[in-house]
């Protein structure tokens, strides 16, 4: 399994993610300052790492909850 180093754009702390898929797009949370970032990985290389605002985090969480609900078959 490959570990990818991700540098937090806010506090510059390096965190690690272990991914089965070398191409990943999604949220990453800094273990130190707890900032959420949107990251894009290609072949285990960080192509993009952008800090998310609280509003954007909220939106993503709500979207995910909504998708989970649909999967479970709730109205
Ligand atoms: Zn951080």
Image (cartoon, grey):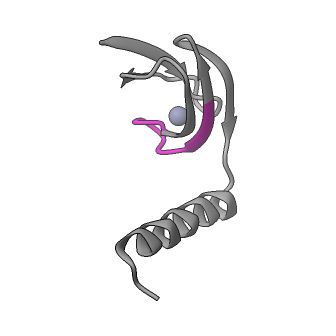
Q: Is residue 28 left or right of residue 74?
A: right
Question: Vertical placement of 74 versus 44: above or below?
Answer: below
Residue 33 belongs to the span the image colors magenta: yes
Q: Position of residue 66 (x, y in %)?
A: 51, 72
Residue located 55% across and 70% down the image: 62
Residue located 63% across and 60% down the image: 54
Q: Quadrant of residue 12?
A: top right
For the image, the number of numbered tags is 0
Q: Quadrant of residue 59?
A: bottom right
- The extreme left residue here reads 1
Q: Quadrant of residue 18?
A: top left
Along the line of sight, the residue nearer the viewer: 70 or 31: 70
Along the line of sight, the residue nearer the viewer: 68 or 9: 68
Residue located 47% across and 89% down the image: 75
Question: Vertical placement of 19 versus 3: above or below?
Answer: below
Q: Position of residue 13 (x, y in %)?
A: 50, 23
Q: Is residue 2 left or right of residue 29?
A: left
Residue 18 belongs to the span the image colors magenta: no
Question: Vertical placement of 4 versus 59: above or below?
Answer: above
Question: Vertical placement of 23 versus 34: above or below?
Answer: above
- The extreme bottom residue here reads 75
Q: Is residue 45 left or right of residue 75?
A: right
Along the line of sight, the residue nearer the viewer: 33 or 73: 73
Point out the image quarter for the N terminus. Answer: top left
Q: Position of residue 51 (x, y in %)?
A: 67, 41
* Residue span colored magenta: 29-39
Residue located 38% across and 23% down the image: 19
């Amino acid at each position: 399994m490959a570990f990818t180093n991700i540098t937090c754009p806010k506090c510059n702390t390096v965190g690690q993610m272990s991914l089965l898929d070398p191409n990943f797009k999604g949220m990453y949370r800094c273990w130190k300052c707890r900032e959420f970032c949107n990251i894009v990985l290609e072949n285990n290389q960080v192509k993009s790492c952008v800090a998310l605002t609280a509003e954007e985090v909220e939106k993503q969480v709500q979207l995910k909850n909504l998708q989970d609900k649909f999967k479970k078959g709730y109205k």
